[in-house]
Image: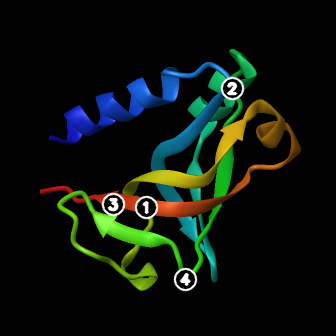
Amino acid sequence: MKQFILILSLILLTACSNETHSIYGEIKSIEADHINIECSDLVRKLDKSKDDIGYSCAIKITDETMIKTQAGDALTFEELAENNEVSVYMEEPITLSAVSERLTFKAKEITVFVNK
């Protein structure tokens, strides 16, 4: 199931060459109102770059952000943990100009993939 969702996420990321609504990655750190996830693949895709620089995206979480497991069970911000793999659906599409200006995005929905 995990591989299926990863493949589906990758298909969604490659469906449109200059914008995307979602990102898939691992939580690297958790701050007061956001999480930082590894997003190098997103930056390289949107920038059409082949660099090997590691990028981290800050994903802002608000009271309206829905956080859930892949089974659909609701989670709280406090239940997120470093190293969780997540799929984040953004409130607005991410474009190359957004990546060029900043690596901070507002999450509409976060799905946490639970290892069994």
Mark 1–mark 3 contact, CB under 8 Å?
A: yes
Q: Label 3 amino acid?
A: Val
Would residue 103 be seen by someone viewing this image from the given angle?
yes
Q: Nearer the viewer, mark 4 or mark 1?
A: 4
3D distance between C-alphas at marks 1 and 3: 6 Å
Q: Position of residue 41 (x, y in %)?
A: 57, 30
Q: Is residue 91 left or right of residue 9?
A: right
Query: Residue 112 — which label?
Result: 3
3D distance between C-alphas at marks 4 and 1: 12 Å
Which element carries disc 2, helix, strand or loop? helix
Query: Residue 63 — which label?
Result: 4
Nearer the N terminus, badge 2 or badge 1? 2
Mark 4–mark 2 contact, CB under 8 Å?
A: no
3D distance between C-alphas at marks 2 and 1: 21 Å
Residue that label 2 marks: 46
3D distance between C-alphas at marks 2 and 3: 24 Å
Q: Position of residue 84 (x, y in %)?
A: 37, 60
Q: Position of residue 115 (x, y in %)?
A: 19, 56
Residue that label 1 marks: 110
3D distance between C-alphas at marks 4 and 3: 17 Å
Q: Is residue 110 left or right of residue 51?
A: left
Mark 4–mark 3 contact, CB under 8 Å?
A: no
Q: Label 4 amino acid?
A: Asp
Foreground pick, 68 / 29 = 68
Would residue 84 be seen by someone viewing this image from the given angle?
no
3D distance between C-alphas at marks 4 and 2: 29 Å
**On-image quarter of the N terminus:** top left
